[in-house]
Structure formats: structure tokens, C-alpha cells
Image (cartoon, rainbow, N blue to C red):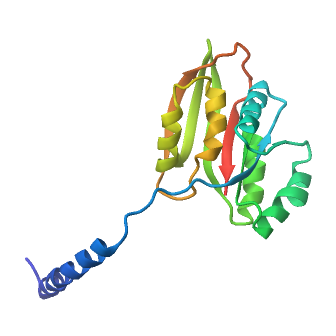
Amino acid sequence: MTNRRQVIGAGIALGLLPAVRGLQAGLPLEAPAAPLAVGCVLVDARHSTAAVMGAAAAEAGFNTVPLPRDVLGLWHDGLLPQLRSGVLQAFGGITTPDGLFLLRTLAADHRRRVVYSAEHTALGQGRVSHQMRGSVATLARVAALSGQGDWRTQQAGVFGLCLATGPRMTHSLSTRCVSSVADAVPLVSWVIA
């Protein structure tokens, strides 16, 4: 049974409906969001797949930086001052999951988070599994790259497609590896902003 409060609330809502529609009609259509400006891509070149992806990222115009053994030194002397000054909006990487964990933890202390990640795991017989996490819009852009040549060069191109906002999702994809060389360790390509 409807009570007095529900009737009054419905009347108020119906009375405001024309005003809300008028406001919505006056709003401009949303322009597609611009991707993040990824200032550098850290590459763990100890792994052949990461080295190939890093070379493709450099070829695509990204500033690639070899991931040193002293990640804390890189963080405190290189990345953190650039993040604090606003010179560096976002940075990416192609590392092991442990490398991402360390950088993600350091970045979280400065209100930065992983906005995109893709774990690449060799399944054997030339197949590679990709577990991707990011905004729906980012993953839609990444899916558009699928099937256009070597997956390693495709993933390098993702650094120029990432968005920081929007609803997040997970997507799995399986591809074939062009090279017979496969890293035993899963690698992760990621962007922190």
C-alpha cells in the first residue's frame, strides 16, 4: 500500500522531470577521452619477450628505460621527482609481476594506481594467454588491435591507448606466439597514473 511520503515524493519527482530534461538537452555531448600521456616505459630486458615489447614501444615513440636492479633508486631519484613536479603524468612498464608489485606499492603512497595491466603467460605450443584489466574504454581500444600482427608489438602500442577513468573490467585473450622462444616467467605490461 502506498503511503503519504511516497505520493509526495513521486509528485516532486514528476514536477522536476521537465527541468532535468532541459538541463540534459543543454549539455554538450561527451568527447572521447584523450589517452594518458605515458612519459616512460620501464623494460625488464632480462626477458626476451619484454625486450621485444620494449623495442616496439621505443619504435612507437615511447621513452623506454631499462629497469635497473635498484628499483628503489630509480623510484626515488627518477620517477618520484617527476611525478611530484607534474612532469610525469603516467608511466608504464613491461616487467615481472614482482616488479609491478613493487612499483605499484611505491606509487600507491603517492595516490597513483595501476590503470591498465595485462599478464602475459606462455601456455606452450606457441600459445600465450593475456589477462587484461583496465577501463572498459581502454580494453575496447586494446581489442581493436587484436589480430594485427605479433602480439608483442600490439601490446607495446597499448601504452598510447590507456584511459585513467571509467568502469573497470577484466578480459582474457589467447594468441599465438610468432617466436618459438618463450619466457618461463609470466610478464606484465602495465600503466600507472
Image coords of residue 2 (percent x, y): 9, 79
The residue closer to the viewer here, 163 or 172, is 163
The residue closer to the viewer here, 133 or 41, is 41
Q: Return the residue found at the far left.
A: 1
Q: Residue at x 73, y 42 (%)?
A: 61
Residue 56 in the image: above or below residue 136: above
Quarter of the figure with residue 13: bottom left
Image coords of residue 187 (percent x, y): 71, 33
Residue 149 in the image: above or below residue 33: above
Quarter of the figure with residue 110: bottom right
Image coords of residue 50 (percent x, y): 75, 31
Residue 97 visible in the snapshot: yes
Q: Residue at x 52, y 47 (%)?
A: 138
Q: Residue at x 72, y 40 (%)?
A: 97
Which quarter of the figure is the C terminus placed in? bottom right
Residue 95 visible in the snapshot: no
The residue closer to the viewer here, 126 or 9, is 126
**Total number of numbered labels?**
0
Which quarter of the figure is the N terminus placed in? bottom left
Q: Is residue 44 left or right of residue 134?
A: right
Q: Is residue 139 left or right of residue 15?
A: right
Q: Is residue 54 left or right of residue 130?
A: right
The residue closer to the viewer here, 101 or 133, is 133
